[in-house]
């Protein structure tokens, strides 16, 4: 990867986003972390990354459901590092319920965090990337951006939306040294999925580990979890010069889920 770059990774205090932020820092990139959760723990993570990788690391608890806070976060990142080269739209939440019971506020929140936040960050970041003459936008979609599952109406709709936004962003930047792509993970064992394993274990009487295997065998032919580090590896490739003619694509990393 080029040296001296600065990245913003939304939803990077946990799971996939944290692994992506670590991988960018390991490549010498300054990184702005973002996320909710325990403030002291997040500050520890920030300090650890700075110490381990010797790059400037910032931290923001900007709420990705609030467009004003999102715009401020993008501006703050550019001010802190003097530039913004890589934007990773990764923040996301889940709610599982049949449509007729799906709470309206859960629908609105998922749309705001999983889809609209990426529009607001992209809108704010593009002028900065254009001015600098280079940029990479990577959206964490999901295999649920390409295929549906029951009881995930808002999540599936938002992730299909992210795949669409990825294509439009790619076309609008096609003649510039800016690319936009999406990564579509299958099951990854993060706190977001741990909640679904717990729910399955409660509903079926299976142990946590049996419920995890059950979840995998239903959808993911490899019957293995994708790891955050594997997804981070794909992000680094998408940010490299080798990927400069790759834009507008949504790449599954899903143990064969989408091949079925
Ligand atoms: P996670 O729960 O471990 O991490 C989510 C991150 O988003 C956390 O840092 C959290 O603080 C942050 N976040 C949540 N709401 C926020 C808000 N309002 N404002 C700012 N930050 C907020 O989950 P994860 O599994 O690492 O998920 C990361 C992304 O990957 C999500 O977009 C998710 O949809 C996607 N994804 C996950 C899986 C999986 O199996 N885990 C599969 C496909 C796609």
Image (cartoon, rainbow, N blue to C red):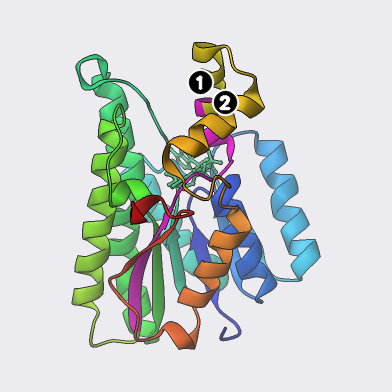
Residue 195 sits inside the magenta stretch: yes
Which residue is under mark 1? Answer: 200
- What residue is shown at x 27% (from left), y 18% (from top)? 103
Image-quadrant location for residue 249: bottom left
- What residue is shown at x 27% (from left), y 34% (from top)? 154
Q: Disc 1 on helix, strand or loop?
A: helix
Q: Earlier in the sequence, mark 2 or mark 1?
A: 1
- What residue is shown at x 59% (from left), y 34% (from top)? 37
CB within 8 Å, label 2 to label 1: yes
Asked whether 78 or 97 is in front, the reply is 97
Residue 188 sits inside the magenta stretch: yes
- Rendered-image quadrant of the N terminus: bottom right
Which residue is under mark 2? Answer: 211
Magenta range is: 178-196
- What residue is shown at x 51% (from left), y 38% (from top)? 216
Q: Position of residue 211 (x, y in %)?
A: 57, 26
Q: Relative to 187, is 3 above or below?
A: below
Q: Disc 2 on helix, strand or loop?
A: helix
Q: Position of residue 210 (x, y in %)?
A: 62, 26
In the image, farthest residue toward the right:
51
Residue 47 placement, left or right of 233? right
């Amino acid at each position: 990867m080029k040296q001296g770059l600065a990245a913003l990774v939304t939803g990077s205090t946990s799971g996939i986003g944290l692994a992506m932020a670590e991988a960018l820092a390991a490549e010498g990139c300054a990184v702005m972390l973002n996320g909710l959760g325990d403030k002291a723990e997040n500050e520890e993570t920030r300090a650890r990354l700075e110490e381990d990788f010797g790059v400037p690391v910032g931290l923001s608890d900007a709420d990705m459901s609030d467009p004003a806070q999102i715009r401020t976060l993008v501006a703050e990142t550019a001010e802190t590092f003097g530039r913004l080269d890589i934007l990773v739209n990764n923040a996301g939440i889940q709610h599982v319920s049949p449509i007729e019971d799906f709470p309206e506020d859960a629908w609105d929140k998922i749309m705001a965090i999983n889809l609209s936040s990426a529009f607001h960050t992209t809108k704010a970041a593009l002028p900065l990337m254009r001015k600098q003459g280079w940029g990479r936008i990577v959206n964490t979609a999901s295999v649920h951006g390409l295929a549906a599952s029951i009881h995930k109406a808002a999540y599936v709709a938002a992730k299909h939306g992210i795949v669409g936004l990825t294509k439009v962003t790619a076309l609008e930047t096609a003649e510039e040294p800016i690319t936009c792509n999406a990564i579509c993970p299958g099951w990854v064992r993060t706190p977001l999925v741990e909640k679904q394993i717990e729910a399955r274990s409660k509903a079926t009487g299976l142990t946590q580990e049996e419920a995890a295997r059950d979840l995998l065998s239903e959808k993911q032919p490899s019957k293995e979890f994708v790891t955050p580090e594997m997804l981070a590896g794909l992000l680094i490739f998408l940010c490299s010069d080798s990927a400069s003619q790759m834009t507008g694509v949504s790449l599954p990393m899903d143990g064969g889920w989408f091949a079925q």
